[in-house]
Amino acid sequence: MKYAGEAPEGPAATTAAGPGSAVPAAREEQRAHDEQRGTRARVARSILDHGPSTAAELALRLELTQAAVRRHLDVLAAEGMVEPREKRVYGARTRGRPAKVFVLTDCGRDAFDQAYDKLATDALRWIAQAAGGGEMGEAAVAAFARARMAAQAEGYRAALEAAPPEERARMLARALTEDGYAATARTAPVGEQLCQHHCPVAHVAEQFPQLCEAETEVFSRLLGTHVQRLATIAHGDGVCTTFIPKTASTKTTTASTSTAGRNPA
């Protein structure tokens, strides 16, 4: 990715101090630009790993000043890598304006993602057409999505079954992170939230929500409880969020897909 403000090339880089000092000066300038570019990459990576973040949160995580973080965010926003949004507030709102958070755009995610989106989309479209299109085609894509997720879940099952019920969400988050989903689990007022800050198939899932629905069903089976998908990256949210109620020790295996693959109301 090429950042704005990189050092110019050619004769423009020569200073009036003469050829003897031009090369060291140009090298020093390039080194400074490289450091700035590296720091901006760290800012973007932190948003990828942790989800929508305020400048204060980024400054704390990266051990930078808030002023420095804001400068990097301004550049990333100008490049179309991040965009500001109003921070979502759960529960009663406090006085004052909500904090501004920064999220990665599709362009920003693409900088970290080398998925073969077009190939995958074409393959799923072919499956749907080969099955006859319409409802039969959608059912065929759903069957593929379930089979794909079932195979992926087999790699997670042993670790989750060995963990106590209260630790399973965190174990699932760890397993998902190893597969590139940058997942975390956090306590919510009446349960837990499993957050996936990155989705390698987000662009494909925009057209085929069956991928999100199959994933939700697999989470339910792995965790042994009803779960509910609250938000997805594929449909414009900053994070894929799955709610897991406190009754995670019960062996209910019915997943709620009423909001899977769609923006919550």
Image (cartoon, rainbow, N blue to C red):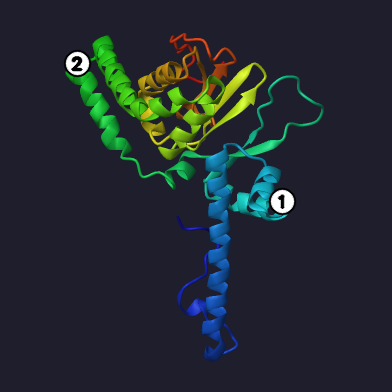
Q: To which residue does mark 2 refer?
A: 131
Residue 241 horizontal/vertical position (percent): 53, 25
Give the crowd class for mark 1: few <14, some 14-19, many >=20 residues within 10 Å.
some
Q: Residue at x 55, y 19 (%)?
A: 243
- Above or below for 36 versus 81: below
Quarter of the rendering containing residue 195: top right
In this image, 40 relative to 88: left or right?
A: left
Q: Residue at x 71, y 51 (%)?
A: 66
Which circle's residue, 1 or 2, is located before the other in the chain? 1
Q: Which mark is residue 180?
A: none
Of 187 and 55, nearer the camera is: 187
Q: Amino acid at mark 1?
A: Gln
- Above or below for 30 versus 44: below
Residue 240 visible at all = no
Residue 148 horizontal/vertical position (percent): 30, 25
Residue 189 horizontal/vertical position (percent): 67, 19
Q: Secondary structure at mark 1?
A: helix
Of 189 and 247, nearer the camera is: 247
Q: Residue at x 54, y 71 (%)?
A: 31
In this image, 245 relative to 70: left or right?
A: left
Q: How many marks?
A: 2
Q: Amino acid at mark 2?
A: Ala
Quarter occupied by the N terminus: bottom left
Q: Which mark is residue 66?
A: 1
| Distance between mark 1 and mark 2 Cα atoms | 54 Å
